Image (spheres, grey):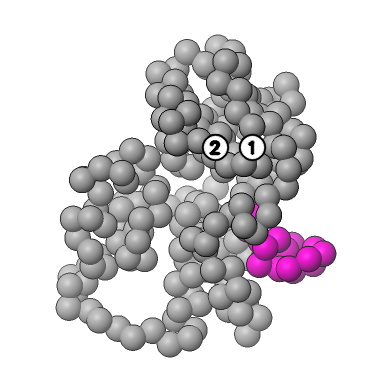
Amino acid sequence: MARYRGSVCRLCRRERMKLYLKGDRCHSDKCAVNRREYPPGQHGQRRRMKHSDYGIQLREKQKAKRIYGVLEKQFRQYFEKADKAKGVTGENLLRFLEGRLDNIVFRLGFSASRKQARQLVLHGHVRVNDRKVNIPSYQVREGDVVAIKSSSQKLQAIKDSVETIVRSGVPTWLELDTDHFNGTIKAIPTREDLGGMIQDHLIVELYSK
């Protein structure tokens, strides 16, 4: 499957905000956004473009794609699915993205980033309802239990991530059991649960043109 292989710090700098793509580094002084608050490239420091309405909508879509680690074709498929579902299209889109297994693994604190979560899923370290699932885009449902398999619970990277999430806390729509390295999807997240980092209405406006 195609996947972005370049520097993820460049993606944050392009959006001029932290997308938290690199785990603990994003919270340190080494964060590229803190050190260079301008877009990447030869003319990044001198470029002061004023975006059109289309440009603003495009940047919001690119930001969402980069946060969740999906490429254009897959992102458009999520939008088409959200558009056909009942309810508000933008909220449906965010719920589909949040419902990805790799995102749930990240939200529960079993990994420091979504990229690391994707690797855990692909390498067979994750179970959903006691069944091995190695598809990062797998959609979890309300009541599902996502767990790290017993032999993988000894991995230091997973232990460190869990210790970090215990201090910061998991979203209210999830429940984490640190003793057994599993988490339960208590409810489908509401728009308020998903925060305001992504302005979904701009993405809907872009695809509605």
Identified at 49% across, 60% down, the residue is: 197
Identified at 74% across, 26% down, the residue is: 129
**Could you classify mark 1 by the number of other residues whose Cα lies within 10 Å: few (under 14), some (14-19), or many (20 or more)?**
some
Give the camera-side residue of 187 and 115.
187
At which x and y percent is residue 171? 58, 42
Identified at 23% across, 64% down, the residue is: 37
Secondary structure at numbered mark 1: strand
The part of the image, by quadrant, that contains residue 19 is: bottom left
At which x and y percent is residue 63? 46, 63
Q: Which residue is mark 2?
A: 170
The part of the image, by quadrant, that contains residue 192 is: bottom right
151 in the magenta segment: no
| Residues under numbered marks 2 and 1 in contact, where contact means CB atoms less than 8 Å apart | yes
Q: Which residue is mark 1?
A: 174
* 205 w.r.t. 158: above or below: below
Can residue 134 be seen at all in this image of the molecule? yes
At which x and y percent is residue 88? 73, 68
